[in-house]
Image (tube, rainbow, N blue to C red):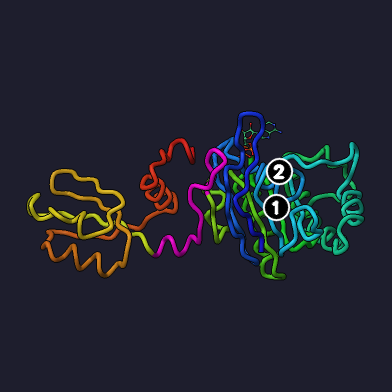
Amino acid sequence: MIRISDLVKTFDDTCAADHISLEIPEGILFGLLGTNGAGKTTLLRLTAGILEADSGEILVDGEPAGASEKVFYLPDTPYYFPNATIEQMAGFYGRQYREMDTEGVRYMAESLNLDMRQPIRTFSKGMKRQAFLILALCARTKYLLCDEVFDGLDPIASEVMKNLFRQEMRERKFTAVVASHRLPELEDICDNIAILHKGGVVTAGDMRMKAENIWKFQCVFHDADDRVGLEKELDVVRCHTDVNFVTLIVRGDREEIRTELYKRRPVFVAEVPMSLEEIFIAEMEVKGYDIRKVLH
Ligand SMILES: Nc1ncnc2c1ncn2[C@@H]1O[C@H](COP(=O)(O)OP(=O)(O)OP(=O)(O)O)[C@@H](O)[C@H]1O
């Protein structure tokens, strides 16, 4: 487990990590979401031990960050020697990571049509990302930290990369932390997501649990009096009224919410599915954040 406690990192006047506390359990894909400058890279670099915190602590399986060979950090623009090939980079990482699986690199590179002996500098951006993800996964560390690994990829390349993660998750218990500024890049592979904004954590948690406790209903009432008191009875996160047509986002037990709505003899009630983005928007509005500044 990665345990981050009250972490602070400032650069001159900028607080890039503002009292961050997070727990990243083992065996999950954890998403770090936030706009440019939110603090994602800083948090990854602190966790990899590349940066030193001003205060607070990061423990990886109980050891201070940076002391552990269990962590592989894949930056958004990975370093490689001027004419290096995938084969040579596998050799380079093999000297740092004891578990490096060079055969695995060869197998994955072949299946993605990447030439092991072609200089990486001649690859397209997407090919480079695939090459480094293969190398990172085959280092077989317990923890993998990736910065913007899906950035700028076409939908097929993005799906290929996601499948590499899924395959690795099936084969061995490892934990990946993936930073991105786009929710769609994370929502279909991450079990947990933390949203960062101005160096702080706005919200974090298990996606399925969040989705299980928040509901969206559309209702039509006979007249305005029928819906009086609804917001007192229910934990309403958001309510939009258009004459007698009401859209509600409500937290709580779904059946209890339905019962409360039907007590008011509505003309019509329908439950509408919520996207993950809507769930986040609702959560953050309650906390007083302007979603446009946090996610877009
Ligand atoms: N080495 C540094 N020196 C000075 N300021 C820095 C440094 N590294 C990061 N910062 C500042 O810290 C804040 C967080 O930056 P960080 O790179 O962690 O954000 P990010 O969420 O990864 O952004 P992006 O999505 O653009 O990569 C920014 O305001 C940035 O300017």
Q: Give the numbered dot on residue 145.
A: 1
Specify whether 234 is left or right of 136.
Answer: left
Residue 40 visible in the shown view: yes
Q: Residues within 10 Å of mark 2 (few under 14, many from 20)?
A: some
Q: Is residue 252 left or right of residue 117?
A: left
Q: Which residues are magenta?
A: 195-212
Q: Position of residue 197 (x, y in %)?
A: 52, 41
Q: Of the residues shown, which amino acid type is indicated by label 2?
A: Gly
Residue displayed at 76% across by 57% down: 71
Give residue 229's quadrant in the image.
bottom left
Q: Classify residue 150 as left or right of residue 131.
A: left
Q: Is residue 171 above or below residue 245?
A: below
Label 2 sits on a secondary structure element that is helix
**Residue 199: in magenta span:** yes
- Name the amino acid type tagged 1: Leu
Q: Residue at x 24, y 59 (%)?
A: 234
Q: Position of residue 131 (x, y in %)?
A: 78, 49
Residue pictured at 74% horizontal, 54% vertical:
65
| Residue 242 coordinates in the image, percent (x, y) | 18, 43
Query: Disc 1 vs disc 2: which is toward the camera?
Result: 1
Is label 1 in a helix, a strand or a loop?
Answer: strand
> Magenta stretch containing residue 209, yes or no?
yes
- Quadrant of ligand 1: it is top right
Within 8 Å of ligand 1, the CB of disc 1? Answer: no
Q: Dot 2 corresponds to which residue?
A: 126
Mark 1 or mark 2: whose residue is earlier in sequence: 2
Query: How many C-alpha atoms fall within 10 Å of the one at disc 1: few (<14), some, or many (≥20)?
Result: many
